[in-house]
Image: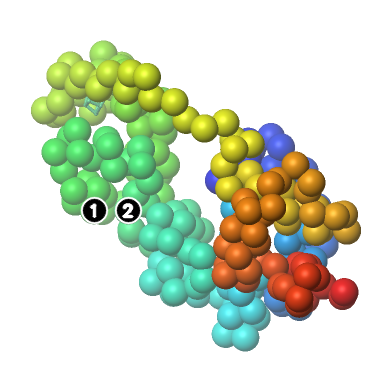
């Protein structure tokens, strides 16, 4: 949920989600349409479906107890698997997000090689914070860095200039926006969003159908598993 949405806004949704589906079997028993409707506005709708699929596996097989088992669940990548295994299970595994990868590269070390023999979870958390707050992508604060004494990049990082003249399309012009609008409209039982031009709408619907986020029956469109 926090991938696309600020954590302050996620918290209320997270609590509501857990109140509705407090366990993996409960979420596994929900229809895809119910799950997508509850997820509306959180972005990356496919995550909601992967989460439901993962819960079906957990409901059948029980919770994995290590990063390899977590990684095998739908929608769980190496970073998430390592972070959960490290923080929840105490496994000695490096949780490598973008920030940690950058810090390790500047230190000239492999993230796995940096992991200490003890307090791995604390180390993972510290490495993430170091990358997020001190060794930032564009302006590392080497003077305040606890790793400065042994960092070969200390004081040498020059941020690449931002690409001049690069313009990104407005969010409303992207198919990602249109996909979100379509799913939100279907979840609310509304007509498909009128502002989307027919050709674009067809492209977006085809993509959503391919990803299992909608079902089509002739001209009728609905969320998967929703009564029509
Ligand atoms: S000394 Fe500078 S470049 Fe090296 S890890 Fe610290 S902040 Fe990053």
Task: Name which of mark 1 and mark 2 comes first in the sequence.
Answer: 2
Query: Please, which residue is most extreme toward the bottom here?
Result: 60
Residue displayed at 23% across by 40% down: 104
Instruction: Point out residue 39 in the picture as x, y percentages from the top left corner.
Output: 72, 55
Drawn side of residue 2 relative to residue 195, left or right: left
Residue in front for this viewpoint, 24 or 180? 180
Element under label 2?
Answer: loop
Kindly tell me whether residue 79 is visible in this rendering. yes
Position of residue 173 relative to residue 64, above or below, is above
- Classify residue 58 by image quadrant: bottom right
Q: Which mark is residue 112?
A: 1
Q: CA distance from mark 1 to mark 2?
A: 6 Å
Instruction: Point out residue 223 in the picture as x, y percentages from the top left corner.
Output: 76, 67
The residue wearing badge 2 is 94
Q: Does the CB distance between marks 1 and 2 fall below 8 Å? A: yes
Residue in front for this viewpoint, 68 or 167? 167
Drawn side of residue 76 relative to residue 103, left or right: right
Position of residue 62 relative to residue 199, above or below, is below
Q: Number of callouts in the render?
A: 2
């Amino acid at each position: 949920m926090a991938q696309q949405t600020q954590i302050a806004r996620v918290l209320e949704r997270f609590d509501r989600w857990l109140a509705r589906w407090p366990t993996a079997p409960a979420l596994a028993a929900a229809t895809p349409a119910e799950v997508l409707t509850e997820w509306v506005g959180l972005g990356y709708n496919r995550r909601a479906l992967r989460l439901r699929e993962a819960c079906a596996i957990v409901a059948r097989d029980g919770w994995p107890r290590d990063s390899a088992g977590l990684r095998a669940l739908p929608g769980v990548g190496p970073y998430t698997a390592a972070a959960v295994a490290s923080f929840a299970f105490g496994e000695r595994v490096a949780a490598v997000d973008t920030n940690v990868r950058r810090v390790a590269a500047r230190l000239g070390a492999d993230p796995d090689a940096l992991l200490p023999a003890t307090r791995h979870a604390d180390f993972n958390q510290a490495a993430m914070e170091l990358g997020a707050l001190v060794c930032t992508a564009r302006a590392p604060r080497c003077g305040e860095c606890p790793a400065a004494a042994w960092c070969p990049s200390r004081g040498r990082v020059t941020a690449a200039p931002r690409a001049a003249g690069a313009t990104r399309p407005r969010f409303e012009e992207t198919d990602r926006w249109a996909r979100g609008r379509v799913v939100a409209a279907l979840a609310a039982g509304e007509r498909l969003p009128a502002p989307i031009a027919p050709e674009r709408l067809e492209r977006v619907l085809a993509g959503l159908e391919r990803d299992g986020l909608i079902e089509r029956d002739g001209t009728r469109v609905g969320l998967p598993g929703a009564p029509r």
